[in-house]
Amino acid sequence: MDRVFSIAIDGPAGAGKSTMARRAAAELGFVYVDTGAIYRTVGYAALKRGILPEDTEKIDELLPQIRVKLAWKDGVQHMYLDGADVSKKIRLPEVSSMASKVSAIPSVRAFLLDTQRIAAKTNNVIMDGRDIGTVVLPDADVKIYLTASAEVRAKRRFLELQEQGRSDPYEEVLKDMIERDYRDMHRAVAPLKQADDAVLLDTSELSLDESIEAILRIIRERLAL
């Protein structure tokens, strides 16, 4: 390959985007960009300063004061905040909730656009999220909209929770999944939707391995690899 390629994978919660994107990137020798970790870094910066997620004015003031950078070591993404590696700290449970809230703030999304786009300009990347193909990388070489029925996604999530020792009823998991879908698709900032030029891949009837094979087939056909 004589130039870098970017692959955008979007889709609803529970579609398995991160798992499949990471596996596909490893198979192709591409870099997997964990966009959630980027938002976690901003959430961690706000949390460290005692800023509440609803205090958008203080978060707006915070953004010009911090430097967020991502880099890869042995194929693993590391996040840096003001020069310090915070890759482990951003995985703390309290950061997860904060990251989810700050990621809905328009100024935060705008602030992190360049960070994500620079990564795609300097590496062969696979990036997943809710608005990668529509907002972050509108000119991506390949766009895939990865989905599955709400029932299938809820079942996958239900089994994951059981493995973690939790006993959330399937009905509640399904209800939460449907409500999250609605929020993601109707939010004011970068709502979840399929890009006009994205390939739709419904994995409701596919296993994990079959889904990854399908993703790889789409990418290889589009890039003639």
Image (cartoon, rainbow, N blue to C red):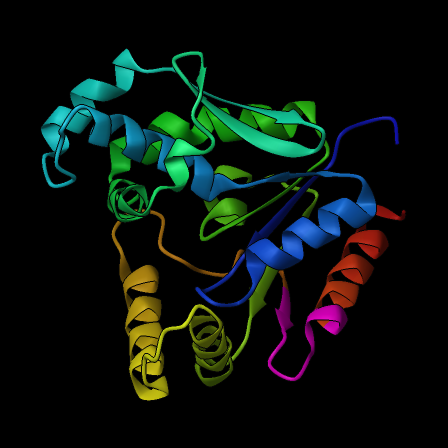
Q: Is residue 33 magenta?
A: no
Q: Is residue 203 magenta?
A: yes
Q: Which residue appears at 79% of the width and 58% of the height? A: 216
Q: Is residue 63 left or right of residue 70?
A: left
> Along the line of sight, which residue is nearer the eye, 146 or 91?
91
Q: Position of residue 49 (x, y in %)?
A: 17, 23
Residue 177 appears in the rendering: yes
> Along the line of sight, which residue is nearer the eye, 145 or 88?
88
- The magenta segment is 200-210
Looking at the image, residue 151 lies above or below residue 77: below
Q: Quadrant of residue 67?
A: top left
> Along the line of sight, which residue is nearer the eye, 191 or 60?
60
> Along the line of sight, which residue is nearer the eye, 200 or 98?
98
Identity of the residue furthest to the front in this view: 165
Q: Is residue 144 left or right of residue 84?
A: right
Looking at the image, residue 59 lies above or below residue 186: above
Q: Position of residue 99 (x, y in %)?
A: 31, 42
Looking at the image, residue 140 lies above or below residue 45: below
Q: Quadrant of the N terminus?
A: top right
Q: Which residue appears at 13% of the width and 30% of the height? A: 51
Q: Position of residue 75 (x, y in %)?
A: 70, 33
Q: Position of residue 109 (x, y in %)?
A: 34, 35
